[in-house]
Image: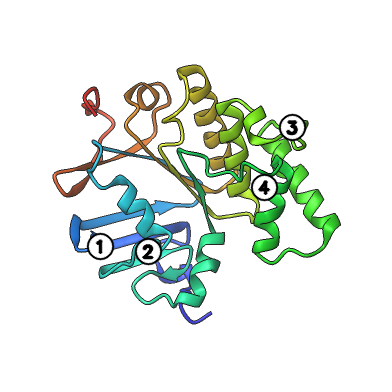
C-alpha cells in the first residue's frame, strides 16, 4: 500500500512504533511536544501521567484517530504523517484497541459482538468466523460465555471480551486506554496478567494508566507524560503516581 514502509528501513527490524520529534495535537490544543518514542515487537509499556497529561491523545495519534500534524511517525509500517483516509482502517486492524468503558453492543451476545467486528473487517465465511471467535474467547478465558449478553457478565469478563475483540484480526499492537479504570483491584490484576501474556506472543502492548499499584506490582518499561513532554522512567527512579 502507498503509505506502508519496510520495517528494515527503521533502526531495527523489531521496531513496530517510532515517533520522532512529534507534536501531539487535540484539535487546536497542543498536548505534547517533541515526542520521541520507539517500541519494539513484544514489548510491554506503561504510559502514565495525570488526567489530561496527554496519554489518551498519544494513543489516539498512534491509531490515527488524531492526525499527526508535526514530526515523523511510523506505526506497524504506516507513515502517520502521510496516511490516506482509505488506509486508516488497515492500520487499525494492526492496532487493537482496549477501551476503559468496554463499548460493547448491549443488544447482542458476546459472539454477535465479535461477529459484527469480523464481518465489518471483511470476514465472510461463517465457519471461519465461528472458529476465530472461539479462538479469541478461549485465549481470554471466556470459552463458555459466548452466548451471554454483556449485562450478564461481570466488569472483568466484559473487559476480557473487549481484549478478545481487539485480538480478532491478529494485530501487531494492542493499545489499552485505562483498561482497569472501572475494575476492582483483583480483577485489574487479572487483566494486566492477560495483557502481559499477549505481549509475550510478540505483540507490542501499550497501557495508559494512572494505577500506581499495578505499575509497581507488575513492573515494565514506563513512559511518563508530564508538563507537555514524555519522559522515560529509569529502573532506579521512583514513579510518583500517588496523586494521579
Pointer 2 with pointer 1, Cβ within 8 A: no
Which residue position holds label 3? 145
Which residue position holds label 2? 11
Q: Is residue 24 left or right of residue 60?
A: left
Q: How many marks?
A: 4
Instruction: Determine whether 125 is above or below 86 in the image.
Output: above
Q: Nearer the viewer, residue 129 or 15?
A: 129
Query: Residue 203 location in percent, x, y?
Result: 54, 48
Q: Which element carries disc 4, helix, strand or loop? A: helix
Depth check, mark 2 against mark 3: the one in front is 3
Query: Residue 131 location in percent, x, y?
Result: 81, 49
Among numbered discs 4 and 3, the one appearing first in the sequence = 4
* x 73%, y 63%: residue: 123
Q: Residues within 10 Å of mark 1 (few under 14, many from 20)?
A: few
Q: Which element carries disc 2, helix, strand or loop? A: loop
Marks 4 and 1, Cα distance to the nearest angstrom? 31 Å
Q: Residues within 10 Å of mark 2 (few under 14, many from 20)?
A: few
Instruction: Determine whether 151 is above or below 119 in the image.
Output: above
Q: Which element carries disc 1, helix, strand or loop? A: loop
- Tell me the number on the disc at residue 35: none
Marks 2 and 3, Cα distance to the nearest angstrom? 44 Å
Which residue position holds label 1? 27
Depth check, mark 2 against mark 1: the one in front is 1
Which residue position holds label 4? 113
Amino acid at each position: 500500500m502507498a503509505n506502508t514502509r519496510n520495517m528494515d528501513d527503521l533502526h531495527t527490524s523489531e521496531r513496530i512504533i517510532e515517533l520522532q520529534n512529534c507534536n501531539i495535537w487535540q484539535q487546536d490544543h497542543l498536548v505534547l511536544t517533541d515526542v520521541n518514542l520507539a517500541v519494539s515487537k513484544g514489548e510491554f509499556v506503561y504510559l502514565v501521567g495525570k488526567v489530561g497529561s496527554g496519554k489518551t491523545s498519544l494513543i489516539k495519534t498512534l491509531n490515527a484517530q488524531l492526525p499527526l500534524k508535526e514530526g515523523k511517525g511510523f506505526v506497524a509500517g504506516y507513515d502517520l504523517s502521510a496516511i490516506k483516509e482509505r488506509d486508516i482502517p488497515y492500520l487499525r486492524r494492526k492496532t487493537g484497541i482496549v477501551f476503559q468503558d468496554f463499548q460493547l453492543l448491549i443488544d447482542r451476545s458476546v459472539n454477535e459482538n465479535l461477529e459484527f467486528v469480523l464481518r465489518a473487517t471483511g470476514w465472510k465465511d461463517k465457519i471461519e468466523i465461528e472458529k476465530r471467535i472461539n479462538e479469541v474467547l478461549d485465549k481470554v478465558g471466556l470459552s463458555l460465555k459466548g452466548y451471554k449478553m454483556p449485562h450478564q457478565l461481570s466488569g472483568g469478563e466484559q473487559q476480557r471480551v473487549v481484549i478478545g475483540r481487539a485480538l480478532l484480526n491478529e494485530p501487531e499492537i494492542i493499545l489499552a486506554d485505562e483498561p482497569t479504570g472501572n475494575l476492582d483491584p483483583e480483577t485489574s490484576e487479572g487483566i494486566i496478567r492477560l495483557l502481559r501474556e499477549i505481549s509475550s506472543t510478540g505483540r507490542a502492548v501499550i497501557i495508559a494508566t494512572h494505577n500506581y499499584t499495578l505499575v509497581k506490582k507488575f513492573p515494565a518499561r514506563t513512559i511518563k507524560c508530564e508538563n507537555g513532554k514524555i519522559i522515560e522512567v529509569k529502573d532506579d527512579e521512583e514513579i510518583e503516581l500517588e496523586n494521579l
